[in-house]
Image (tube, rainbow, N blue to C red):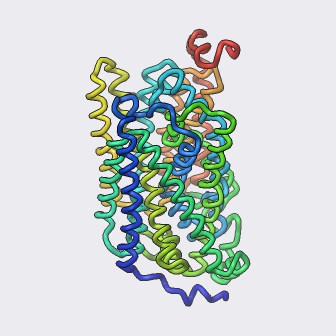
Amino acid sequence: MNSFYYTVSIPKPDISYGIWAGIGIGIMLLICILLGFYSRKKSTSFESFLSGHQDIGPVITGLALGATWLSGWATLGMMGVTYAVGWSGMWFAGMWTIVGIMPCLFFTGAKMQQYAEKFGARTVPDVLGIRFDSRIVQSLSALVMIFFMMLYAVGQFKAGATIWYAVTGLPAIWCLFLSGVIVFIYMVVGGYTGTQFSLALQGALLGIACFILGISALVFVGGPSSLNAMLFSQDPKLLALIRSDLPVKGNTQLFSSPVGVVATFFIFLTMATGFPHNVARFLGMRKLTKKDFSLITLMVFLVAGPPIFLNAITGLASRAVFGPEILKIEPWKGDLAAPYLAMAAGGKPITILYITGVFAAALSTLSAMVMVMAGNITRDIIHIWKPDISRALLLKLTKLFIGIFLLIPFYWTFKKPPALLAVFMGYAAIGLGGIFIFCTAISFFWKRATATGAILCMLYGVVATLLGSIPVSRQRIGMGTLEFIVLIGCAFFYFVGSLLTKPVSEEKLKQLFGEKNV
């Protein structure tokens, strides 16, 4: 059994897979369009287009949150990590993901819903503008979010391109273009509500697809013990939980050093709680009861729990079966691990389900981000500084920016796709998480936080992530070290900047935290 992977060749592209996958994707996208038209009546005004009517229940919200959390990173990129480095990739590809998303429910969800219900907040920067009583905080946070989410959006298009290449061998441009057009239609027609329902559908689909593929992969290699034996026959280092043979600087620090392993915990903790497209899922939610909270927790766990762990197993199984050959395929490399294993282990039914699931994951996160970015421009930059502008014009501009923010990452992916999906998106995760864990989550509970502290935190986070990525790419420091540089620095500027400046008025604090808590 140890030489099994030598007898399994990489599947050749088969246009019939593409035809059936196209049908599966088409059905999924058609349903999304119908959901968009179903929600059209609830998205006629500018405000309702951005966040609905605060009437969406816990099942839809939980599934939508799971969809935005997983994305193309989790359903494709994570398998590429464990395929490339073995068990040590588990820390970055699955071990901490559920640990990260649950605090988003506990610490952020109810607060976001309260700001939407009590103060009429429509976007995440809108929430921050209310919390800090500052237009500058609101507009600056919008710009910071757009910058980092643009990087993340590129990853979603790359996930779709990779999966399409694997099954057909054909250029992905037409599939990507069609997907972008479909996303544009259901977002423009259905607004936030239509997008939220589409996200819920996509979340359920990708959770089922990843679960089935993971179980099929484990069965295909003969179970856990056989999997490890096959990996050991290639390289015993693939079984190590920390790859001390890999460089402790650069991207590989996340797999080769205790510093990197600990850093992955903080990356997932901060990104889940601080990602604006995650926490925005709560803006259209109804007020949570105890039963609702149990339901939303269950939905998130079902989508982002076992399927995530099995994703990492799929990457390991692909390495056991195919050896390191996939790493030679440019520019896709390890990101092809899961689609090739789906073709080898599951045949057409599982492959088509998985391909549809990856597109669902990629498009769900993409649509959530695009909706956030478009709203950031019109609500948090244009409207906040020019409040007398027509609501009808703002609505038209929001729809226009949806198209623009779909086109930019599409063109970027088409011209120069990133090498390893999960690592590329990790930079965006470090920046967004390090900044907004403080400006959003902690600000909900720390009354002393000030606009100055939030502004300094945002400015430092952007500069540190940009400048820090240079020595990481040149292998002078590790990616885990960069996480701590960004996180600790953001904390310093947030807390010190707040302590040295005057907080919002006592009357405002009573509105935000309640009279008994001030």
Q: Where is residue 115 in the image (x, y as percent from the top left)?
A: 54, 25
- For the residue pair 29 and 473, the one nearer the viewer reads as 29
> Which residue appears at 34% of the width and 21% of the height?
385
Outermost residue, right direction? 225
Residue 339 x/y as whole percent: 48, 72
Residue 172: x and y in percent read: 33, 66
Residue 240 to residue 191: above or below = below
Judging depth in this view, the residue of 33 and 255 nearest the camera is 33
Q: Which of 246 and 390 is in front in this view?
A: 390
462 lies left or right of 479: left
Q: Which residue is drawn at 55% across and 79% down?
A: 345
Image quadrant where one finds the N terminus = bottom right
Query: Could you tell me residue 270's position as x and y percent?
Result: 60, 42
Taking the spot 54% from the left edge, 81% from the top edge, the residue there is 322
Direction from residue 42 to residue 245 in the image, left or right: right
Above or below 483: residue 132: above
| Quarter containing the C terminus | top right
Q: Tell me the quarter of the picture where residue 282 sits.
A: top right
Labels in figure, total: 0
Residue 492 visible from this viewpoint: no
Determine the residue positioned at 36% across, 62% down. Answer: 26
Is residue 127 at all visible to an observer of this figure?
Answer: yes
Task: Give residue 320's quadrant in the image.
Answer: bottom right
Comparing 227 with 498, the one in front is 227
Question: Is 479 rendered above or below residue 336?
Answer: above
